[in-house]
């Protein structure tokens, strides 16, 4: 099976890169797939995550104004695909151009689209001008037009199904990055959050909740790991809330597993999500999670009051109270943690890998190789 993944870049520390490193490597190493990854303007061989040495890479350089960029990309993509001659193409590009790849390539083989974020991710936030409203409608129309061209349109959660009206929809969740034998003791006075600083991740909401928590439990600390964006002004907000010494912002680290093991609670304050892979990673270490019930992902992963707590999206006070509940109730915290570790076994790479292998082979009428 010769499979091509078309992406933007895979050298960064993001969730899509992490997921692809797990899926593509498993298909190459355990199912004998011939995997090719096509990137755009990625002029480095140094990858943040580890990919199987069996995987082959192709990069397209496309620069210039939007029209020249689009022309160079389309021309380069056609050339690469013609050379590889794939059995299946999987597009992992959450931008608008990802929806147009079947038209660019004239669909030379079965094609699958993988959606890793909410449909609303391309829609601008805030007050809408007439131009913005027209732009949003055009984007929505292009997504509807392009999405129907794929043989399968794969989303990560049941909630994501509600965002699309296609007949070719299918749900396959993200695989776990790891499932360790050990687990957190849940005794450290440490709360963890992981993800790049952005409007989506809602760290402004988390800090406001954290103010309430540390006023009652000043010995606890919040650690946030992810790409730092000074434009989010989170340091300023922490200073205004007088919690600077109780929250720590760190850049991405490769050994994030160690941070989960050291945490006693995990918090996700996102306004919207594609899945929430960080939740499954924390739960794999037996760490109970508190999350806003945002669209979409947390409600698929967390069973409320069984292995974590879901809070109405935007309820900052409720979020603080949920954190306080698990800080102040050790028995409940450890019970939730044990349930969490058991619950995420359904996301083990071998199970998710089997789903992908079955899907790819159904498109090519080939038998299972592993």
Image (cartoon, rainbow, N blue to C red):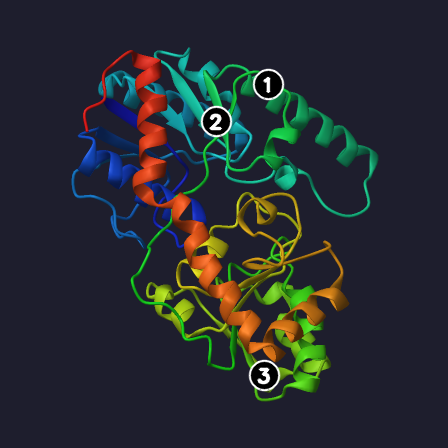
For residue 70, the mark is 2
Q: Is 117 left or right of 72, judged from the image as shown?
A: right
Q: Which residue is mark 3?
A: 246
Looking at the rendered structure, the secondary structure element under dot 2 is helix
> Which of marks 1 and 2 precedes in the sequence?
2
Q: CA distance from mark 2 to mark 1?
A: 26 Å
Q: CA distance from mark 3 to mark 2?
A: 47 Å
Name the quadrant containing residue 204. Answer: bottom right
> Residue at point 38% right, 52% down?
12
In this rendering, the answer to whether 78 lies above or below 336 is: above
> Which of marks 3 and 1 precedes in the sequence?
1
Q: Is 139 left or right of 133, judged from the image as shown?
A: left
Rendered location of residue 364, percent (x, y): 30, 13
Name the quadrant containing residue 58. Answer: top left
Kindly tell me whether residue 335 is visible in this rendering.
yes
For residue 166, the mark is 1
């Amino acid at each position: 099976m010769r499979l091509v993944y078309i992406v933007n870049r895979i050298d960064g520390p993001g969730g899509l890169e992490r997921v692809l490193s797990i899926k593509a490597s498993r298909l190459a190493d355990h199912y004998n797939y011939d995997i090719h990854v096509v990137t755009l303007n990625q002029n480095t061989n140094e990858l943040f995550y580890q990919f199987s040495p069996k995987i082959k890479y192709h990069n397209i350089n496309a620069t210039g104004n939007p029209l020249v960029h689009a022309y160079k990309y389309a021309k380069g993509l056609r050339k690469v695909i013609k050379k590889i001659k794939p059995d299946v193409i999987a597009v992992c590009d959450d931008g608008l151009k990802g929806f147009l790849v079947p038209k660019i390539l004239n669909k030379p083989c079965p094609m699958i689209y993988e959606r890793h974020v909410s449909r609303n991710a391309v829609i601008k936030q805030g007050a809408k001008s007439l131009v913005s409203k027209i732009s949003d409608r055009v984007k929505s129309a292009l997504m509807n037009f392009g999405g129907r061209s794929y043989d399968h349109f794969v989303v990560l959660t049941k909630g994501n199904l509600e965002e699309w009206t296609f007949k070719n929809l299918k749900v396959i969740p993200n695989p776990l990055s790891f499932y360790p034998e050990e687990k957190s003791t849940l005794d450290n006075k440490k709360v963890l959050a992981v993800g790049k600083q952005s409007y989506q991740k809602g760290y402004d909401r988390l800090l406001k909740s954290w103010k309430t928590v540390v006023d009652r439990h000043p010995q606890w600390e919040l650690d946030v790991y992810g790409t730092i964006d000074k434009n989010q002004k989170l340091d300023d907000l922490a200073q205004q809330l007088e919690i600077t010494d109780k929250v720590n912002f760190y850049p991405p680290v490769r050994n994030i597993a160690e941070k989960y093991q050291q945490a006693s609670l995990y918090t996700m304050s996102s306004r919207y999500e594609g899945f929430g892979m960080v939740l499954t990673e924390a739960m794999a270490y037996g760490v109970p999670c508190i999350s806003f019930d945002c669209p979409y992902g947390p409600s698929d992963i967390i069973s409320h009051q069984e292995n974590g707590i879901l809070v109405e999206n935007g309820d900052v006070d409720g979020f603080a109270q949920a954190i306080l509940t698990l800080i102040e109730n050790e028995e409940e915290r450890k019970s939730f943690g044990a349930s969490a570790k058991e619950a995420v076994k359904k996301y083990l790479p071998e199970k998710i890998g089997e789903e992908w292998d079955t899907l790819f082979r159904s498109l090519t009428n080939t038998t299972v190789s592993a």
